[in-house]
Image (cartoon, helix red, strand yellow):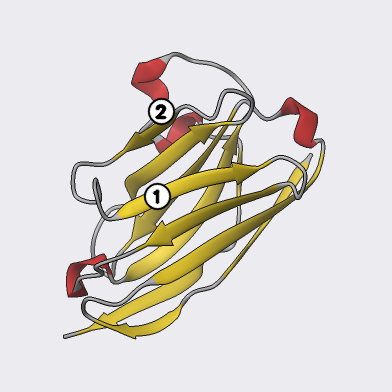
Amino acid sequence: QVQLVESGGGLVQAGGSLRLSCATSGRTFSIYRMGWFRQAPGKEREFVASVTWSAHNTNYADSVKGRFTISRDNAQNTEDLQMNSLKPEDTAVYYCAADTTDWGIASTELGRYYDYWGHGTQVTVSS
């Protein structure tokens, strides 16, 4: 089992920044990839970004490229999401997720391939 706990959400004005962190514990050696997803009210969950555990290869949704940066800290067992130039449309609950299998690049953005999920942290961007 892998446990994930998100932190760092909050309220920020448009154009501002927030840094989300995901603390991992348990069988972290089994993790292949970590990801961030988000879900806004009335909308489906969507992929935000991912990073492979060992190689630090990253992938981003087009909507956040150039604004968000995902990173891994192997020593601290944390995964962070630095969010800059935030927009009101970034408002959502953000979830950290862990994938223990390399299903290939096509699976990176699909939530059903991730095995473990955190409880989420709210990010609200005011206009």
* Disc 2 residue type (three-letter): Thr
User: Where is residue 32 shown, x and y percent of the image?
Assistant: 62, 25
Q: Residues within 10 Å of mark 2 (few under 14, many from 20)?
A: many
Question: According to the image, label 1 marks what residue?
Answer: 69
Residue 8 appears left or right of 105: right
SS at mark 2 in the image? loop
The numbered mark at residue 51 is none
User: Which mark is first along the chain, 1 or 2?
Assistant: 1
User: Where is residue 69 shown, x and y percent of the image?
Assistant: 40, 49
- Residue at the (59%, 43%) spot, across then down: 72
Label 2 vs label 1: CA separation? Answer: 16 Å
- Residue at the (51%, 64%) spot, across then down: 20
- Residue at the (49%, 15%) spot, across then down: 103
Q: Residues within 10 Å of mark 1 (few under 14, many from 20)?
A: some
User: Where is residue 109 shown, x and y percent of the image?
Assistant: 36, 33
2 and 1 marks in contact (CB < 8 Å) = no
The quadrant of the image that shows the C terminus is bottom left
Question: According to the image, label 2 marks what residue?
Answer: 108
Residue 52 falls in image quadrant: top right
